[in-house]
Image: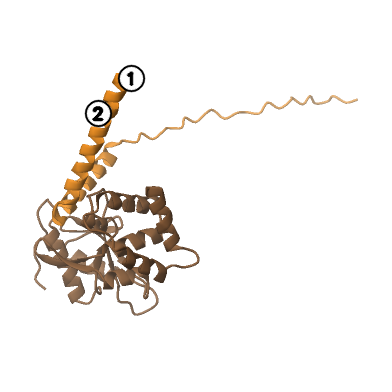
């Protein structure tokens, strides 16, 4: 793998995406996709967020998942951790390991392929982004959905969303009801 | 009353222009939206750093010496 010197002072998004693709090619991470606030931004207005959530599956030998091989590899390229994230080409990336058969894994498998500064990348579908926010259901998650409903550039496929919500609903988190409540409060 | 109507109309115009602006931002290419969000992050982080928290120094008070009633020796009934 060719080592490119760590870039200039401004974030280099294309090179950051290339680094993620290289991590996947070397097997340090599996298929990955952008989720969280930055996934919402693909479909609506830009908002403040402290890092780009990259959902992936980290191969592990035992029960415990270790991020060390990924961090070691990135450190060897000159990228240091900063809080929960790693600054790759000045782009803050947070890796999030997805559980098998989870909504998040489904989101990664069905992510939309895009290009960012000429480099292939994947981003959650708008329906998966909404479903995961309804699952986590923090105040900021509900606000993100609110912003999306106000400024969406891509319409939400209600049938696809409802199907997702029903599939991944549990007695503890009634996702269809949360969606209904949110739509009602949104007016 | 006329002032109230004028203010209401101005507020409606302002909200409408804000909504238009938000729609324009939403339609930007994804790369530009990410760049804007990262700029916001940098600004937010620098604002956090700008807030200097002065630690409150706790001034130690002199120890309170309990005033015990003096025992007078040799006082016997």
Q: Quadrant of the N terminus of chain A?
A: bottom left
Q: Position of residue A120 (x, y in %)?
A: 14, 68
The local secondary structure at tag 2 comes to helix
Residue that carries the numbered disc 2 in the rendered image? B10
Residue drawn at point x = 30 percent, y = 55 percent: A83
Q: Quadrant of residue A53?
A: bottom left
| Residue in the image at 33% along x and 50% along y | A146
Q: Residue at x 20, y 73 (%)?
A: A24
| Residue A55 seen in the current view | yes
Q: Please tell me whether residue A99 is drawn above or below residue B57 in the rendered image.
A: below
Q: How many marks?
A: 2
**Earlier along the polypeptide chain: callout 1 or callout 2?**
1
In this rendering, would A184 be left or right of A51?
A: right
Query: Foreground mark, 1 or 2?
Result: 1
Chain B shade:
orange
Residue A77 visible here: no
Q: What whole-number distance in Å separates the C-alpha atoms at marks 1 and 2?
A: 14 Å
Image vertical order of residue A113 relative to residue A142, above or below: below
- From the image, tell me which residue sits under label 1: B1
Element at label 1: loop
- Chain bearing tag 2 is B
Q: Position of residue A25 (x, y in %)?
A: 18, 76
Chain letter corresponding to the colour brown:
A
- The residue furthest right is B77
The residue lying toward the viewer, choosing from A109 and A95, is A109
Residue A9 on image: x %, y %:
11, 51
Quadrant of residue A137 within the rendered picture: bottom left
């Amino acid at each position: 793998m060719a080592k490119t010197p760590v870039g200039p002072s401004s974030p280099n998004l294309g090179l950051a995406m290339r680094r993620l693709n290289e991590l996947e090619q070397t097997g340090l991470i599996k298929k990955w996709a952008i989720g969280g606030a930055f996934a919402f931004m693909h479909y609506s207005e830009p908002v403040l967020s402290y890092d780009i959530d990259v959902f992936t599956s980290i191969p592990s030998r035992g029960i415990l998942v270790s991020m060390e091989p990924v961090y070691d590899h990135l450190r060897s390229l000159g990228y240091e951790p900063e809080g929960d994230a790693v600054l790759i080409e000045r782009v803050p990336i947070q890796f999030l390991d997805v559980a098998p058969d989870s909504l998040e894994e489904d989101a990664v498998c069905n992510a939309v392929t895009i290009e960012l500064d000429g480099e292939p990348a994947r981003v959650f579908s708008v329906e998966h982004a909404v479903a995961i926010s309804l699952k986590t259901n923090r105040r900021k998650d509900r606000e993100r959905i609110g912003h999306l409903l106000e400024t969406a550039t891509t319409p939400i496929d209600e049938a696809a969303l409802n199907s997702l919500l029903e599939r991944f609903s549990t007695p503890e988190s009634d996702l269809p009801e949360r969606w209904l409540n949110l739509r009602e409060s949104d007016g | 009353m006329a002032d109230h109507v004028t203010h209401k109309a101005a507020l409606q115009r302002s909200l409408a222009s804000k909504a238009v602006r938000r729609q324009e931002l939403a339609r930007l290419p994804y790369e530009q939206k990410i760049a804007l969000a990262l700029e916001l992050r940098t600004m937010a982080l620098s604002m956090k750093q700008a807030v200097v928290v002065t630690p409150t120094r706790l001034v130690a008070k002199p120890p309170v010496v309990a005033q015990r009633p003096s025992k007078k020796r040799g006082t016997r009934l």
